[in-house]
Amino acid sequence: MPKKKSPDENKPKVNNPNVLGLRAEVLEQPITDTLELNYMPYAMSVIVSRAIPEIDGFKPSHRKLLYTMYKMGLLTGARTKSANIVGQTMRLNPHGDAAIYDTRVRLSKGYGALLHPFVDSKGNFGKVYSRDMAWAASRYTEAKLAPICTELFRDIEQDTVDFVDNYDNTMKEPALLPTTFPNILVSANQGIAVGMASQLCGFNLGEVCDTTVAYLKNPDCDLSATLLAPDFSTGGEVICDSAALEDIYRTGRGSVRIRAKWRYVKGENLIEIYEIPYTTTTEAIMDKVAELIKAGKAREIADMRDETDLNGLKLTIDLKRGVDPDKLMAKLFKTTTLQDSLSCNFNVLVAGTPRVMGVQELLEEWCAWRTESVRRRIYFVLGKKKDKLHLLKGLKRILLDIDKAIHIIRETEEESMVIPNLMIGFGIDEIQAEYVAEIKLRNINKEYILKRVQEEESLRDEIDDLEDTLNTPKRVKKIIIDELENVKKKYAVPRRSTIVYGHEVEEYVEEEQIADYPVTVFLSREGYFKKITPASLRMSSEQKYKEADGPFQSFEASNRDEVMFFTDKCQVYKCRLSDFEDSKASVLGDYLPTKLGMEPEEKVVFLHLPGDYSGQLIFFFENGKGAKVEVKAYQTTSNRRKLTGAYSDKSPLCSIVALSADEELAAYSTEGRAVIFSTALMAPKATRSTQGVQVMTLKGKHHLSSVRRLEDTGITNFARYRCRSIPAAGALLREEDSDDKQLEIL
């Protein structure tokens, strides 16, 4: 006989029975059904009920918290413990206490995330600009609603918005808050849903109110005329790009560049950063700067520390000697989050549907929603006044024969029949009869009767006015505009973020790492230039020149040094020695007119190494004048390679002399005269094209031929040619003071 199977053997087998010996039954389900039944409801809940703000500018968690505080009487009352607020909010918000408290912290004044905080806080709430500064627990802090919340809950009890059941149907909560201003544009907000996100930047309240008023008056108005740029609670500078702002205003997408504010303390040689971008933290900035210092990319910084205290944020950077603070900050803006971008994505729930809208669309939706709220409020007030008028009409009928009313009440045996008897006796309805029956005996007098009659007349006028308002869209707009202007007057504050236009911002261009080593430079009379290393010079020091060419100037320098070439066309060409290849004495070198791209027939007449741009250059002209110009007059912030108007063009150039300190020079004329004078007699000028002062008095057709340092002349009797003031005619050159050396421009 076949073996009989046990009941357990008839059950489906599974591969992984659990440790208790129980068997699990695996049910197959198509992945599409799993997504539709399990994932899609979750995704829609996150989008609609959690992460995306609605037209009033709030997410559900914000709205539930603020409404709870409103019902607790914290709009006008004293502060209460945050733990109490969190516990009460759980009646509307089923999330845990930590999540609710985190939400409340972000809305607080102490945290500083909003331009206009909704929670007036007391205690430690951390700071939005700090990653590590934690806020205190809810049992230690206190809070109440800020005064601006009056505009969030204005007329909320007058049917301005819909009320819905909370999660367990035990109480009602508002679906939206009836904000009297476009909070959606004022309060910064961000959220990440399923498959979408939202990022709204804040704008200045005064600018938003002005823009909304302008839009209500003319929907085709220019928004950028009143809504200048986003405004951030952490301040900083908004780098205004008209095209980028136009995209944000039109599409709701784009980015805004923000950078820190700083100041240079000259006496202590340090930089203080006192406002940073909204998108970063002090710790992130400090970490990045430390990384740059470690990598050797911020050698200008001696030390950096966080000196934030009760007076506010402050990051201090100690500079090394000789560091240009503007150039350093330009580098830090480029390489750290001291300059950052905020991506905008104006994704807002409208009637339960997420929509990415530009500023104009947001204003259109908000104005339509606010118009409906105002109309609902007017309907509510109108209904109340009509109800009161209805009661007064019944009272008026009674008052025509008050004795009859008293008689009916006295003759009625049962209390329940008083109302029906009054209705029959005077032809009024139950509501009117109930109102009449509740009048106190002391009010049945002539004065009371006259006041009620007069009140009926004023009520009729008010009802007519309210009905006219409902039928006149312009009057509804006027109400909204008046409320916006009132909000601006009460709560608007100056911009915190300064607007800086793009063309005013100097972009940092990272310089290549240039090797630093000593070189000797040579310039020939014909304009050939060579840069030779000491090792190459030791091997061969005899310079090669073209026929009829020869040495003109030579200097010892560094490969990183800047060099200026002055030409006979009143121009100067600036470059670095590193731009030239290392050469040898046995080659001709680079021909400067070709290398520098000079004009046809333009020649180099002088070479100068500016170094730190100290000292002066003296230009001497054939008309006997000399112009003493500060070298810093040739310093530029940009990488300009050619400067025009390097010196005066009123007379041909004779000589150029470079000075680090005042000394005596000898000037020669074609008449055979010479004069020795001190350069201290010449005042330095900041203008490059100055004509200077007369140095030597010339006769007839004679002109200045050259100017040299005393050690480069053959003069032995200095007293004969020395003068105490300029201009001077000089003395005729004696044979023993002349020399046969070729004159050079030094």
Image (cartoon, grey):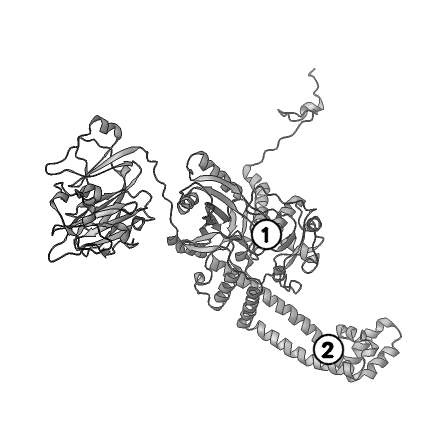
SS at circle 1:
loop
The numbered mark at residue 389 is: none
560 left or right of 486? Answer: left
Gap in angstroms between the C-alphas marked 2 and 1: 45 Å
Horizontal and vertical percent position of residue 59: 59, 52
Residue labelled with disc 2: 392
65 left or right of 181? Answer: right
Which residue lies most toward the right here? 413
Give the residue at x 25% y 56%: 690
User: Who is closer to the viewer here, 635 or 326?
Assistant: 635
User: Who is closer to the viewer here, 425 or 151?
Assistant: 151
Res 596 visible: no
Of the 4 image quadrants, the one containing the N terminus is: top right
Number of numbered markers = 2
Horizontal and vertical percent position of residue 538: 23, 27
Residue labelled with disc 1: 59
Horizontal and vertical percent position of residue 462: 64, 76
Q: Is residue 320 above or below residue 726?
A: above
Q: Tag 1: Cα neighbours inside 10 Å, few (<14), some, or many (≥20)?
A: many
SS at circle 2:
helix
Give the residue at x 50% y 66%: 213
Residue kind at label 1, given as amino acid type? Lys
Q: Is residue 195 above or below residue 585?
A: below
Q: Quadrant of residue 609?
A: top left
